């Protein structure tokens, strides 16, 4: 009987705790975008483990291979780059200490197209360009794989001017890893 009461009390406490936690997740200020506004939502955990150290420089090369599910949706991979920026800055790391490079290939290749050519290909404005502009403003390099551009039959002069044309994603990733960048596949 005692075990049953203890188990019931523990279950009730867990339910109350879960309900209280769920309520905070629904509040409008639970998710924030402190640096890359409107992109890369985070919920900052001030006491979370493995937080970045404000005095360190962080070098990360992101391999973006996920395009949006629909042409009018931002690439989830590119949005995760914004999330990384927001998490590091919320942890106290200044933008000047973030050496981030994101290279698009595969189904993410089209995110690099300028608006006119994206519209011609997909019939809608390129939803990634506002995010690319925000990331570029914050010092993040966005690149596109030259080989993927050719494979998709996209001309090189169709690339948005804020995006860097790289020889390939393969060489970008390996070259930057040799220079001490951490590899983050998205």
Image: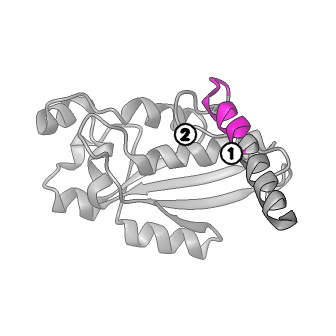
In this view, the residue in front, 176 or 43, is 43
The reply to whether residue 94 is in sight is no
Magenta stretch: give its range.
18-29
Could you tell which of marks 1 and 2 lies nearer the N-terminus? Answer: 2
Residue 161, how many percent across, how many down?
36, 37
For residue 22: magenta?
yes
Residue ID at (27%, 56%): 107
Q: Characterize the local packing of mark 2: few (<14), some (14-19) or many (20 or more) Cα atoms within 10 angstroms.
A: many
Q: CA distance from mark 1 to mark 2?
A: 9 Å
- Residue at the image point whose x is 81% and y is 56% from the top: 56
- On the rendered image, what quadrant is the N terminus found in? bottom right
How packed is label 1: few (under 14 Cα within 10 Å), some, or many (20 or more)? many
**Residue 14 is covered by the magenta coloring:** no
Residue to which mark 2 is pinned: 40
* Whether residue 27 is visible: yes
Q: Looking at the image, is 7 positioned above or below residue 132?
A: below
Please state the horizontal and vertical placement of residue 99, each as a whole percent of the image. 64, 53
Left or right, 121 with respect to 70, comes to left
In the picture of the structure, the residue carrying the numbered disc 1 is 87
x then y, percent, for residue 49: 81, 59
Q: Quadrant of residue 120?
A: top left
């Amino acid at each position: 009987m005692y075990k049953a009461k203890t188990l019931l009390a523990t279950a009730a406490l867990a339910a109350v705790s879960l309900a209280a936690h769920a309520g905070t997740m629904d509040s409008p200020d639970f998710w924030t975008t402190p640096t890359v506004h409107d992109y890369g939502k985070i919920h900052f955990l001030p006491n979370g483990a493995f937080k970045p150290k404000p005095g360190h420089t962080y070098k990360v090369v992101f391999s973006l291979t996920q395009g949006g599910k629909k042409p009018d949706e931002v690439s989830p991979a590119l949005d995760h780059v914004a999330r990384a920026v927001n998490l590091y800055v919320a942890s106290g790391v200044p933008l000047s200490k973030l050496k981030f490079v994101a290279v698009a290939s595969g189904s993410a290749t089209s995110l690099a197209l300028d608006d006119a050519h994206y519209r011609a290909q997909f019939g809608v404005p390129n939803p990634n360009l506002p995010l690319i502009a925000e990331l570029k403003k914050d010092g993040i390099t966005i690149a596109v794989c030259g080989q993927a551009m050719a494979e998709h039959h996209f001309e090189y002069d169709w690339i948005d001017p804020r995006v860097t044309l790289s020889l390939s994603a393969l060489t970008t990733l390996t070259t930057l890893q040799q220079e001490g960048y951490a590899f983050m596949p998205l």
